[in-house]
Image: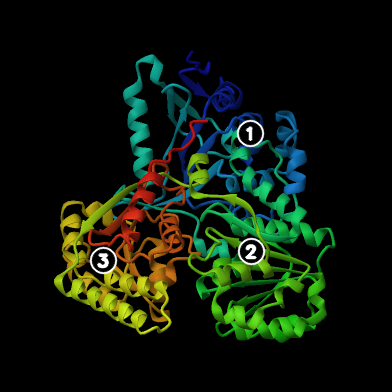
């Protein structure tokens, strides 16, 4: 049965109480609130504490578009909200609190509440600046409340969102979809979406800058003062389970799909063990400067510990060794540097936590040779990966289990899609046949392999498969198939990441791409790092890259993944499609696209492409749980 808020059709501050007669009943009723307003202060939250208490506890979501003419203290609260320290133990106690306590806390610590509301995505702010033919301020004042079963209410009027707004003479008019005024409501809904998605030609809308998220340290010790609905807390319950399993086992691997919070789970473990005085120091190792930089930002923002770096041009090992107590050493995953760190720490490792991100890479031959028996001396050892097993490498897998531990917890892509943590995706398998030149090369590879075998020489079938895969990865037969697809569906190139095997193949692809998407760029090495940054900001819409972007990079706006190069092992494919499956707050209807190239010339012994097609087709049928 539909419900409606009992509010007047028009209000003015001389004869009405805007809070009691309008905002409070609407907030208690609504599931979503969209607001465009010229001026906002946290005083509005204080005045509307009771309504926002119900709104937050009922799982409501709000979006505010405001003019950037805000109080400095309120802007600091917006910034601080983005990366708060996680207070999980306290948070568990807060779950039992009721709405009345939220009201009390909000009136007492309004700025803290505002920050938490933004962090939990209950409120999201964007800032509007007039441009083109408009040279003044964003001065509109309208809003839309969404209820159940397509019941909607919009309002327009003079009042700003501030405590002072309630002391002025102000008025609003209310339009209800159930009272024959749905055309006014639809008009407000459409223009809000136009503004929010930055599609109005005379208004530029900005989100909070990513640079601010990374640069400002958080200084907040208070916890969430409101209840997160059970449906939301259950969504991330897997992180609680992973933390508990590791604390019980002390050593092992958490197998968690890309985008499900591996880093945050690890940081929770760090903070828990350190607060319990189980450890004195931490070593974190990962591969790739981009991923290491992300770890540095997260650790700096989420902990109060000193973080030292030993990768790229950073050489802060001596500073770390002078004061390891309460410190974190962030080191690249190469044999020389890891050996040096472990050697200097010596017996101290018995009071330390060792974390290896993307732990599947930890089983490489160079690390197996140089680190066997050295890592397992650490008191606690944690491995993180979406796919911890090294396919076709028994020795590497054995090394990981011996040094880090067994897989303790599994939360796969299917689980994450069902819970709504990752988005659903469509799969497009495109078939191609090898060129005559490719077929000749594959025959030559087979012949060389069989010749060695007949001569009694040592041969490894995995080497054979790798050579055959290399031919397919670089096959020019995929190029006309790619051209045919994008000539018909250019939309697939929007927010797209194209994986190729080599820079040379990428150049061939560019000759096609330039006719359909001239604003593409490449990202192969350090010289292209600026292009990755521009792509993450949305300044570049299409990026061509190779293996080095497969792991650890978090750009939520990526929609399409083109697999013009795929490994036989599932590991790389999972990492690559995971780049597009992250939920994007700016695109609530996001549905990812995975475009794959399947060779039809596979033999019975080598059918990795067809196996991948079956697997990804099945995975693409996974649907979000309606609960």
The dot on residue 519 is 3
The dot on residue 139 is none
Q: Position of residue 135 (x, y in %)?
A: 35, 54
User: Residue at image x 24%, y 55%?
Assistant: 430
Q: Real-space Cα distance between discs 3 and 2?
A: 39 Å
Q: Dot 1: what SS?
A: helix
**575 with respect to 123 (left or right):** left
**592 with respect to 327 (left or right):** left
Q: Which mark lies nearer to you, 1 or 3?
A: 1
Q: Position of residue 321 (x, y in %)?
A: 76, 83
Say if residue 541 shows up in the picture. Answer: no
Q: Dot 2: what SS?
A: strand
- Residue under circle 1? 230
Label 1 with label 3: CB-CB less than 8 Å: no
Q: Position of residue 440 (x, y in %)?
A: 19, 75
**Residue 250 in the image: above or below residue 88:** below
Towards the viewer: 305 or 344: 344
Q: Real-space Cα distance between discs 1 and 3?
A: 44 Å
Q: Position of residue 521 (x, y in %)?
A: 30, 70
Label 2 with label 1: CB-CB less than 8 Å: no
User: Residue at image x 41%, y 44%?
Assistant: 424
The dot on residue 383 is 2
**391 with respect to 479 (left or right):** right
Q: Sequence-wise, which precedes: disc 1 or disc 3? A: 1
Q: Sequence-wise, which precedes: disc 2 or disc 1? A: 1
Q: Dot 3: what SS?
A: loop
């Amino acid at each position: 049965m539909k419900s409606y808020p009992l509010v007047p059709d028009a209000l003015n501050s001389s004869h009405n109480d805007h809070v009691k007669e309008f905002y409070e009943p609407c907030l208690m009723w609504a599931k979503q609130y969209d607001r465009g307003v010229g001026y906002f202060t946290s005083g509005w939250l204080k005045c509307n504490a009771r309504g926002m208490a119900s709104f937050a506890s009922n799982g409501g979501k709000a979006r505010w578009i405001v003019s950037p003419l805000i109080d400095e203290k309120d802007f600091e609260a917006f910034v601080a909200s983005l990366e708060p320290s996680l207070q999980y133990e306290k948070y568990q106690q807060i779950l039992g609190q009721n709405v009345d306590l939220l009201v009390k806390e909000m009136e007492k610590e309004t700025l803290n509440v505002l920050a938490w509301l933004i962090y939990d995505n209950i409120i999201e702010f964007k800032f509007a600046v007039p441009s083109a033919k408009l040279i003044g301020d964003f001065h509109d004042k309208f809003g839309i409340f969404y209820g159940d079963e397509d019941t909607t209410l919009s309002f327009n009027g003079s009042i700003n969102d501030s405590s002072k707004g309630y002391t002025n003479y102000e008025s609003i008019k209310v339009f209800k979809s159930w009272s024959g005024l749905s055309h006014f409501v639809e008009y407000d809904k459409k223009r809000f979406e136009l503004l929010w998605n930055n599609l109005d030609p005379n208004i530029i809308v900005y989100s909070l800058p990513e640079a601010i998220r990374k640069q400002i340290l958080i200084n907040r010790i208070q916890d969430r003062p409101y209840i997160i609905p059970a449906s939301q807390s259950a969504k991330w319950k897997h992180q609680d389970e992973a933390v508990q399993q590791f604390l019980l086992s002390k050593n092992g691997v958490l197998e968690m799909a890309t985008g499900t919070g591996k880093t945050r789970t690890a940081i929770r473990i760090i903070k828990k063990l350190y607060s319990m005085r189980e450890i004195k120091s931490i070593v974190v190792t990962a591969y790739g400067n981009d991923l290491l930089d992300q770890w540095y930002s997260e650790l700096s923002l989420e902990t109060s510990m000193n973080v030292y770096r030993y990768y790229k041009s950073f050489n802060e090992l001596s500073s770390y060794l002078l004061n390891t107590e309460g410190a974190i050493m962030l080191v690249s995953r190469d044999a020389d540097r890891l050996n040096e760190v472990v050697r200097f720490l010596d017996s101290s490792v018995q009071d330390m936590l060792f974390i290896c991100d993307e732990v599947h890479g930890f089983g490489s031959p160079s690390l197996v040779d140089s680190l066997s028996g050295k890592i397992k001396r650490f008191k606690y050892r944690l491995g993180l990966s979406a796919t911890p097993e090294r396919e076709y490498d028994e020795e590497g897998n054995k090394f990981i289990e011996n040094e880090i531990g067994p897989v303790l917890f599994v939360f796969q892509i299917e689980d994450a899609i069902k819970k709504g943590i990752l988005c659903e995706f469509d799969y497009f398998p495109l078939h191609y046949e090898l060129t005559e030149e490719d077929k000749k090369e594959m025959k030559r590879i087979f012949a060389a392999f069989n010749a060695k075998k007949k001569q009694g020489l040592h041969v490894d079938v995995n080497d054979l498969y790798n050579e055959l895969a290399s031919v397919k990865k670089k096959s020019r037969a995929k190029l006309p198939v790619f051209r045919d697809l994008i000539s018909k569906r250019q939309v697939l190139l929007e927010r797209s990441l194209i994986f190729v095997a080599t820079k040379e193949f990428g150049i061939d692809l560019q000759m096609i791409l330039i006719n359909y998407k001239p604003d593409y760029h490449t990202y192969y090495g350090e010289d292209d790092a600026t292009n990755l940054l521009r792509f993450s900001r949305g300044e570049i819409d299409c990026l061509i890259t190779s293996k080095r972007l497969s792991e650890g990079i978090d750009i939520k706006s990526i929609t399409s993944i083109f697999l013009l190069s795929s490994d036989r092992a599932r590991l790389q494919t999972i990492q690559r499609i995971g780049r597009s499956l992250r939920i994007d707050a700016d695109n609530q209807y996001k549905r990812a696209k995975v475009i794959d190239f399947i060779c039809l010339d596979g033999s019975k012994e080598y059918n990795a492409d067809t196996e991948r097609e079956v697997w990804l087709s099945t995975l693409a049928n996974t649907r979000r749980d309606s609960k």
